Amino acid sequence: MGSQSTPAPTSQRVEYVKASIAMLEHTSRCRDPACPSDSCYKLSRVMVHNRGCRRRRIESCFVCQQLVTLCRFHAKECHKERCRVPYCQRIRRKLQERAMALLDEPSLLE
Ligand SMILES: [Zn+2]
Ligand SMILES: [Zn+2]
Ligand SMILES: [Zn+2]
């Protein structure tokens, strides 16, 4: 993934994020009302909350913010045409637009 200089996360954190993303992908596809996964249940509650969240700005809701952060991680790696993960397609479109904008930008600062 390019040469963006994000600080290297600790491997523990990476594992945690990976597990959370896997859970997000599972839950967004999971249609089993009796799914045995506890995390799936919790995450599906978060998604239900998100859909009905009354706060106008994501930034003002801690629950939604966490969900969107997770979706961002997922979207960076996702190439599915029809992805069920919330925000995925929207985030990817934004990332693409930004990449295009960066390409178009004349490099005046160099
Ligand atoms: Zn499930
Ligand atoms: Zn919310
Ligand atoms: Zn996706």
Image (cartoon, helix red, strand yellow):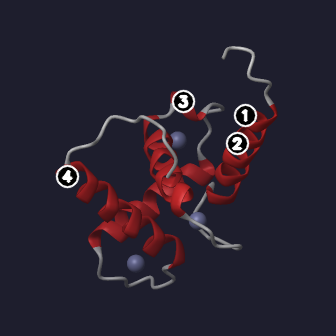
**48 or 27, nearer to the observer:** 27
Give the residue number, with chain letter if any, for mark 2.
Answer: 99
In percent of width and height, residue 40 lies at 37, 70
Q: Please report the residue visible at 45 percent of the width from the left and 85 percent of the height from the top.
A: 32
- Labelled pair 1, 2 in contact (Cβ < 8 Å): yes
- Secondary structure found at label 4: helix
Q: Nearer the viewer, mark 2 or mark 3?
A: 2
Q: Please report the residue visible at 52 percent of the width from the left and 49 percent of the height from the top.
A: 72
| Amino acid tagged 1 | Leu
Q: How far, Cα to Cα, is label 1 from label 2?
A: 5 Å
Q: Check the picture and name the quadrant holding the C terminus.
A: top right
Q: How far, Cα to Cα, is label 1 from label 3?
A: 25 Å
Give the residue number, with chain letter if any, for mark 4.
Answer: 11
Asked whether residue 48 is in view, the answer is no
Q: What label sits on residue 59 in the rendered view? A: 3
In percent of width and height, residue 30 lies at 48, 80
N-term-proximal mark, 1 vs 3: 3
Q: Please report the residue visible at 66 percent of the width from the left and 45 percent of the height from the top.
A: 95
| Amino acid tagged 4 | Ser
Q: Nearer the viewer, mark 4 or mark 1?
A: 1
